[in-house]
Image: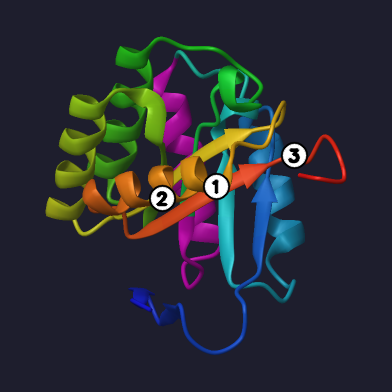
């Protein structure tokens, strides 16, 4: 198994890593939640940006990211916009999704981005290359909370993530029956 190192954390060896998700809706909540989490024992802070209300204001989003980085400089920061089609809080265009991730990469404030596999092959490949060029790791994800695909399909998706040079492939499914 390949390991991934983010800050001083080695993912893929040793104990499973604990991720805490911050789902604040505004900049004040980002600060208060970050301060509350600061003393908790976890490995990675995931910021679920799809919960952030002022999403159209990239400066506000990056100001919130700066607060997170300053509050917990030692923790790896995972920047995640989960699209509505994959179970997230907001729907945005593919162009806005890619631009938001690129802004996070350009900011130098995030260590990892979560990039959805089915964003579009060309956009995914370009964003992975862009992230890697800026020393940002990519968690490539796919979420299906309505059905569980056949095992062959799950494996095909994971292989596609590998072929797109994802650092960490991730699939999240919601079983609908005991056979799932």
Tally of numbered tags:
3
Q: Position of residue 176 (x, y in %)?
A: 82, 34
Q: Quadrant of the N terminus?
A: bottom left
Q: Position of residue 173 (x, y in %)?
A: 67, 41
Q: Residues within 10 Å of mark 1 (few under 14, many from 20)?
A: some
Q: Secondary structure at mark 1?
A: strand
Magenta segment main secondary structure: helix
**Residue at image coords 46%, 78%:** 12
Gap in angstroms between the C-alphas marked 3 and 1: 10 Å
Gap in angstroms between the C-alphas marked 2 and 1: 8 Å
**Residue at image coords 69%, 36%:** 24
Instruction: Give the residues drawn in magenta, as a range.
Output: 57-77
Mark 1 lies on residue: 171
Comes first in the chain, label 3 or label 2: 2
Q: Position of residue 110 (x, y in %)?
A: 38, 52
Gap in angstroms between the C-alphas marked 3 and 2: 17 Å
* Labelled disc at residue 158: 2
Q: Residues within 10 Å of mark 2 (few under 14, many from 20)?
A: many
Position of residue 37 in the picture relative to residue 65 (left or right): right
* Labelled disc at residue 174: 3
Asked if the stretch drawn in magenta spans residue 74, the answer is: yes
**Residue at image coords 60%, 16%:** 90
Q: Secondary structure at mark 2?
A: helix
**In-front residue for pair 127/172:** 172
């Amino acid at each position: 198994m390949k390991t991934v190192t983010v800050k001083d954390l080695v993912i893929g060896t040793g104990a499973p890593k604990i991720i805490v998700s911050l789902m604040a809706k505004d900049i004040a909540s980002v600060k208060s939640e970050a301060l509350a989490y600061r003393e908790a024992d976890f490995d990675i802070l995931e910021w679920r940006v799809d919960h952030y209300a002022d999403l159209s204001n990239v400066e506000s989003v990056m100001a919130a990211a700066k607060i997170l980085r300053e509050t917990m400089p030692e923790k790896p920061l995972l920047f995640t916009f989960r699209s509505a089609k994959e179970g997230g809080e907001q729907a945005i265009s593919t162009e806005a999704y890619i631009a938001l991730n690129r802004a996070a990469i350009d900011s130098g404030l995030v260590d990892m981005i979560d990039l959805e596999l089915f964003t579009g092959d060309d956009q995914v490949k370009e964003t992975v290359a862009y992230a890697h060029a800026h020393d940002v790791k990519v968690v490539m994800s796919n979420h299906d909370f309505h059905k569980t695909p056949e095992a062959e399909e799950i494996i095909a998706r994971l292989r596609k993530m590998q072929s797109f040079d994802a650092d960490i492939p991730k699939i999240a499914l919601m079983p609908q029956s005991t056979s799932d």
